[in-house]
Amino acid sequence: MTPREYMNRANILLRRIKRKRREAEEIRIAEASPSSPVLSDMPKTASHDKDGMSRRICRAIDLDHEADLAFAELEELKHSFLSSLEALDNPDERDLLYKRYIEFKCWRKVADEIGYSESHTKRLHAIAVKKMILHDTQ
């Protein structure tokens, strides 16, 4: 797997996890919020949705479970990528790729942390990626 393929898949999984967690939290907040009392002399209509609250809570639980599955898939993806990183001889290259693809840091932050300019960091990245791809094809 190339770093680009890894990053695309990881970003998709991260977005899925965030979306599902957010949806579940919105359901929980809506169910926990008190509703306004209806002050009226009119008789109340019979509710046709007797199990609505339990369905919404079950939906929130299902969303959490789906997010957990996506998180497990992301962890497996990271583990696979880390195995590829271990094949690199140069620890600086491994560190650069780790910061970029496992910690998901932006180029500027990676460059600051490894002590190079952003453009030089990108050149080192290109070299490391080529070595990684060459090693994976062997």
Image: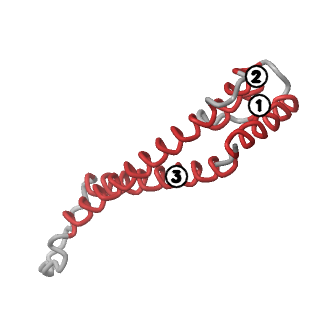
Q: Which amino acid does label 3 sit on?
A: Leu
**Residue contact at pointers 1 and 2, CB within 8 angstroms:** yes
Callout in the foreground (3, 2):
3
Q: In this view, does 77 lie above or below 118?
A: below
Residue 108's disc is 1
Judged left or right of residue 72, residue 52 is left
Residue that badge 2 annotates: 112
Whichever of callouts 3 and 2 sits on the residue coming sooner in the sequence is: 3
The amino acid type found where label 1 is placed reads Arg
For the C terminus, the quadrant is: top right
**Residue 135's mark?**
none
In the picture provided, is 120 more to the left or to the right than 18?
A: right
Quarter occupied by residue 115: top right
- Up the image or down, 100 lies above or below 67; here it is above
Residue 88 location in percent, x, y? 69, 29
The picture places residue 54, in percent across and down from the top left corner, at: 19, 63
* Mark 1 and mark 2: Cα distance apart in space: 6 Å
Q: Which of 92 and 66 is in front in this view?
A: 92
Q: In this view, does 60 lie to the left or right of 22?
A: left
Q: Distance between the residues labelled 3 and 1?
A: 24 Å
Give the residue at the far top of this rendering: 115
Furthest residue to the front? 138
Q: Name the residue under label 3.
A: 13
Q: Quick one: SS at disc 2? A: helix
Name the residue located 14 percent from the left edge and 78 percent from the top edge: 44
Residue at 24% over, 61% down: 58
Relative to 69, 18 lies left or right: right
